[in-house]
Image (cartoon, grey):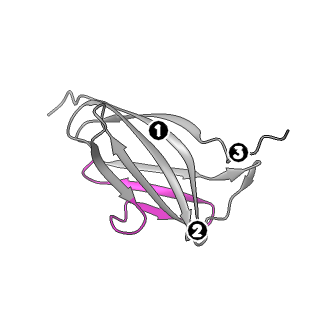
Amino acid sequence: MSIIYNIEPVAHTIFITAGDSIDISLGVYLNDVAFDMTGYTLNMDVIDKWGETVKTWDSEASGAFTIAATGFNLYDTSGFTTAGNYNADLQMTSGVEIMTIARWNIIVQPQITI
């Protein structure tokens, strides 16, 4: 019997300092080949340890994601105001297909200098 499954999402731990802007650029590869993201959108809901959504980043309404041909940039000037651990799934959508391409553990460290 064959096992069929979607791509395994890559896991990232991202460290951010509370109060800082976020500017992250990443490429998307499938079988070591740059993936053409033309026609796709991105969406990510960031949740806290209670399962509450604290941020919604996407490439449409919030405009936090900017998509290039084979990668994307996440830019958020408000960042996080509260230190803590957060989780998020990054989903790529093309009208019909929805693919979770990354799982992020976001660790927001307290700001030392105010």
SS category of the residue bearing label 2:
loop
Disc nearer the start of the sequence (1/2): 2
Name the residue furthest front.
1
SS category of the residue bearing label 1:
strand
Return the mark for residue 96. Answer: 2
Q: Residue at x 54, y 63 (%)?
A: 93
Q: Quadrant of residue 109?
A: top left
Q: Which numbered mark, 1 or 3, is in the foreground of this view?
A: 3
Q: Is residue 8 above or below residue 90?
A: above
Q: Residue at x 48, y 60 (%)?
A: 42
Please tell me which residue lies in front, 37 or 16.
37
Q: Residue at x 67, y 46 (%)?
A: 7
Q: Which residue is mark 1?
A: 104
Where does the image place residue 11, in percent across and percent down from the top left? 55, 35
Distance, label 1 to label 3, CA atoms, is 20 Å
Q: Which residue is mark 3?
A: 5
Q: Which numbered mark, 1 or 2, is in the foreground of this view?
A: 2
Name the amino acid type tagged 3: Tyr
Q: Residue 76 lies in magenta, yes or no?
A: yes
Using a 10 Å C-alpha cutoff, classify the residue at mark 2 as few (fewer than 14 neighbours), some (14 to 19) or many (20 or more). few
Q: Residue at x 20, y 27 (%)?
A: 112
Disc nearer the start of the sequence (1/3): 3
Where does the image place residue 50, in percent across and percent down from the top left? 27, 33
Please report the bounds of the magenta region as a residue range: 58-79
